[in-house]
Image (tube, grey):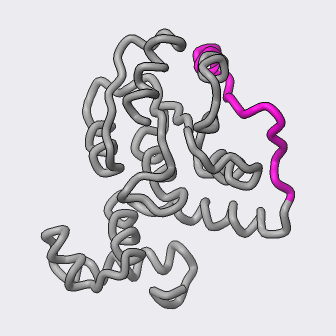
Amino acid sequence: FCEALALTLKAVAGIGAVETVGRLETALERLAREPRPDVVVLDLNLPDVTGFDGLIRVSAAAPDVPVVVVSSLADNRSISAALAAGATGFVPKHSTREIFRAAFAALAAGRPYLPEGFSPSETPDAGRREDAIARLKLLTRQQAVILQLICEGKLNKQIAYELSIAETTVKAHVTAIMRKLGVLSRTQ
C-alpha cells in the first residue's frame, strides 16, 4: 500500500519526492533531521503503534508539519479522534485518486482536508477521549516510547534493557507518565 500511495502522490498530487518508512520510530528519527518534509502521510496501522499514539508522537515531533492520516478506519469517531490527536487531514484508504488530489490541493492552500460526509462525533465519551489525548500530548518522546513498551506488557527491567537505560530511570519515567495521565497504576 505504501508504494502504491507514493506513486499516487507523485502522479496525481504533484509531489516530487516521497520518502517512505514502515515503522513509527524510523519516521520519528527522520523528522528529527533537516530538511523537514512538507507533509507527513501517516497510516494508523503501523507495527510499532497502538491507536492514536503514533499520530500524537509525530505531531509532537514536528508540530509545524501537517499530518494527513490515511486509514481504513474511516468512521466519524476515528476521524474526530485523529483530528483531536493532531491530524491536519484525513483520507480513507479506499479513496480514489481524485480524493487524494483534492486533499493535497486543500493542504497546499493551507486548509485541512476531511472526507465528504464527515460530521464531528457527538458521543458521550468524546470529552473523555479529548482529555485523554490532551494528556498523552504532555508526554515527552522518551515517555511515549516507554508507555508503548508498557502497553506491550514489558516490565521495567525489560524496558531498561531494550532502551539501554537504568531501571531507576525507567521507574522515574513511569512515575511521571502516570502523573501526567492521571492514573494510579500501570494497568489503569
Residue 60 placement (x, y as % from top left): 46, 47
Quadrant where the N terminus is found in the figure: top left
Q: Is residue 81 above or below residue 4?
A: below
Location of residue 84 with respect to 98 vertically, above or below: below
Quarter of the figure with residue 165: bottom left
Give the residue displayed 42% in from the left and 20% down from the top. Answer: 7
Check the picture and name the quadrant holding the C terminus: bottom right
Q: Is residue 24 left or right of residue 108?
A: left
Q: Residue at x 41, y 24 (%)?
A: 6
**x, y percent for residue 142:** 32, 62
Residues 74 and 54: in front is 74
Which residue occupies 79% across, 31% down? Answer: 116
Residue 105 lies in magenta, yes or no?
Answer: yes
Magenta stretch, main secondary structure class? loop
Residue interval drawn in magenta: 103-122
* Nearer the observer, 128 or 13: 13
Percent from the top left, x then y, of residue 18?
Answer: 36, 22
Q: For residue 174: magenta?
A: no
Q: Nearer the viewer, residue 34 or 78?
A: 78
**Residue 2: percent from the left, percent from the top?**
40, 34
Is 88 situated left or right of 164 in this image? right
- Viewer-nearest residue: 9 or 163: 9
Tally of numbered tags = 0
